[in-house]
């Protein structure tokens, strides 16, 4: 006899809440965009971060990675327009090199 597993039906309320939360998250992300010069000045003043890398993405946007010289912090910005910068990632403990460690196996 073959077992079959049926997915429980999703209540419309849950699906609606998920869509609402996704919409709010993208709105909040868009609200954090600012002028490029302001973003770089704030990262420099608050974290001592400097531009480490910049390049063009396949979608045509400019990607900028800033980092503190001591390796303490980094920030990833995307530049969707001439004078707009939107943070899309940040973290701690960066290093330059090819000795990558899989996530969860640090230290």
Image (cartoon, grey):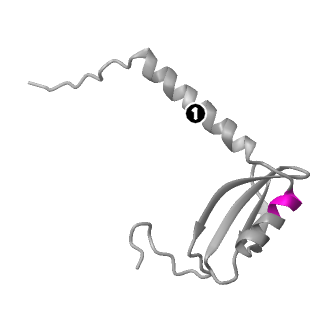
The answer to whether one can see residue 53 in this image is no
The answer to whether one can see residue 12 in this image is yes
Magenta-tinted stretch: 36-40
In the rendered image, the quadrant that contains the C terminus is bottom left
Give above or below for 47 relative to 61.
below
| Residue at image point 43% right, 22% down | 14
| Residue at image point 73% right, 41% down | 30
Q: Of all residues shown, which one is farthest toward the left? A: 1
Figure quadrant of residue 94: bottom right
Q: Residue 9: within the magenta?
A: no
In the rendered image, the quadrant that contains the N terminus is top left
Q: Within 10 angstroms of label 1, few (less than 14), some, or many (20 or more) residues? A: few
Q: Is residue 82 left or right of residue 33?
A: right
Figure quadrant of residue 72: bottom right
Q: Which residue is mark 1?
A: 22
| Main secondary-structure element of the magenta-colored stretch | helix
Point out residue 53 in the picture as x, y percentages from the top left corner: 76, 71
Point out residue 19 in the picture as x, y percentages from the top left corner: 55, 26
Point out residue 78 in the picture as x, y percentages from the top left corner: 75, 54
Q: Of all residues shown, which one is farthest toward the top? A: 12
Point out residue 2 in the picture as x, y percentages from the top left corner: 13, 26
| Residue at image point 75% right, 67% down | 43
Give above or below for 16 relative to 74.
above
């Amino acid at each position: 006899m073959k077992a079959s597993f049926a997915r429980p039906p999703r209540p419309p309320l849950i699906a609606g809440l998920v869509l609402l939360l996704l919409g709010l998250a993208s709105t909040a992300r868009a609200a954090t965009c600012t002028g490029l010069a302001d973003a770089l000045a704030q990262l420099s003043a608050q974290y001592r971060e400097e531009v480490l890398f910049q390049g063009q993405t396949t979608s045509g946007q400019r990607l900028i990675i800033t980092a503190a010289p001591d390796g303490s912090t980094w920030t990833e910005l995307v530049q969707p327009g001439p004078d707009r910068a939107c943070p899309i990632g940040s973290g701690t403990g960066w290093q330059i090199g090819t000795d990558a460690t899989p996530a969860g196996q640090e230290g």
